[in-house]
Image (cartoon, rainbow, N blue to C red):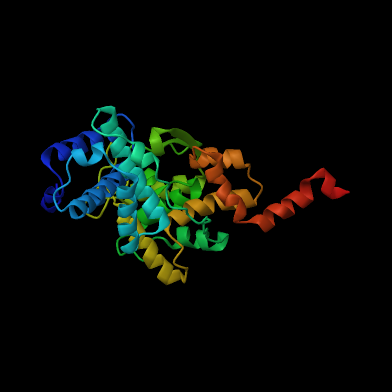
Amino acid sequence: MNQAFLVHATKPLLEQRTSWLSALEAERRASANTVEAYERDLRQFLQFLTGYHGRPAELGDFADLKPADLRAFLAARRRDGAGAKTLGRGLAGVRSFIRHLEKKGLASSAGARAIRAPRQGRSLPRPLTVADALAVTEEAGALALEPWVAARNTAVMTLLYGCGLRISEALGLTGDALRDSAARAIPITGKGGKTRLVPLLPVVHEAVADYRRLCPFALSGNEPLFRGTRGGPLRPQIVQREMQRLRGALGLPGSATPHALRHSFATHLLAEGGDLRAIQDLLGHASLSTTQGYTAVDSARLMSIYDAAHPRAQR
């Protein structure tokens, strides 16, 4: 634990924090990214409470937490430059901890429930064009000095665009994954521990097989499929850095991120008449409303499909 953090909370409160984080992982099966984000949200709130009260935060502060306290926290975060989305997620993390304490009779969530999350403007996904997405997958290895690293980068980018995976899902694949070149689909475990079946294109098999052939490390069992240059698990930051280099080399906009390849996967399927429900399943979205965000991206294309296909449009 960061030693500087210890001054912002008493020992009993830190013990409850540890219990809460363990429950998120074991009982709610939250992803590592979610646990990390929630831990950071609570840490920021405890740091705020320390300055707010002029002493380290303690369990008693949560027993009678008022809406005004949370509003002051959000205001402080806003002054630090946090946007509506960040504030909303931060509030969600704090609420989760308060509910954990409430179950143990140590707090009340009434004050937290009385606070509305900051209103967020609707932000639509910004996918790449088909040409740019193909360029990324084809040139992904061009900037690497070692052939196996080039093959690795190509395989990762091909999975993101060819299968619509999140970075965490692609990097979470084990050494035994994608060994069967005849497999038409692969099970992917996404957010909330939910598993979906994602179809595999031949180009995905080819990219991963090429990487396997060149990789100097043993790739089997439950060890990570994708490795860093020292043999450890490939980190998301490396993938993001490689995408940043590709943006410069290919002249792509700043919105061309690894996650944009996932958006592109869905948007390009939708533009070609793909079924929204089917795309929802492929992406692993719990709610159709999340997937519906893609429908506004290519509305002109959707209208042309509608005009060409709907019986009443033919009259």
Where is residue 29, by image quadrant? Answer: top left
In this rendering, the answer to whether 114 lies above or below 4 is above
Left or right of 285 on screen, residue 69: left
Whether residue 170 appears in this view of the structure is yes
What number of labels is visible? 0
Measured as percent of width and height from the top left, residue 294 is found at 57, 51
Where is residue 103, by image quadrant? Answer: top left
Q: Nearer the viewer, residue 51 or 308?
A: 51
Measured as percent of width and height from the top left, residue 27 is found at 31, 29
Whether residue 221 appears in this view of the structure is no
Where is residue 35, by image quadrant? Answer: top left
Q: Nearer the viewer, residue 136 or 106?
A: 106
Left or right of 266 on screen, residue 222: left
Q: Nearer the viewer, residue 119 or 294?
A: 119
Measured as percent of width and height from the top left, residue 192 is found at 39, 35
Residue at 21% across, 53% down: 52
Q: Nearer the viewer, residue 168 or 234?
A: 168
Measured as percent of width and height from the top left, residue 308 is found at 78, 51
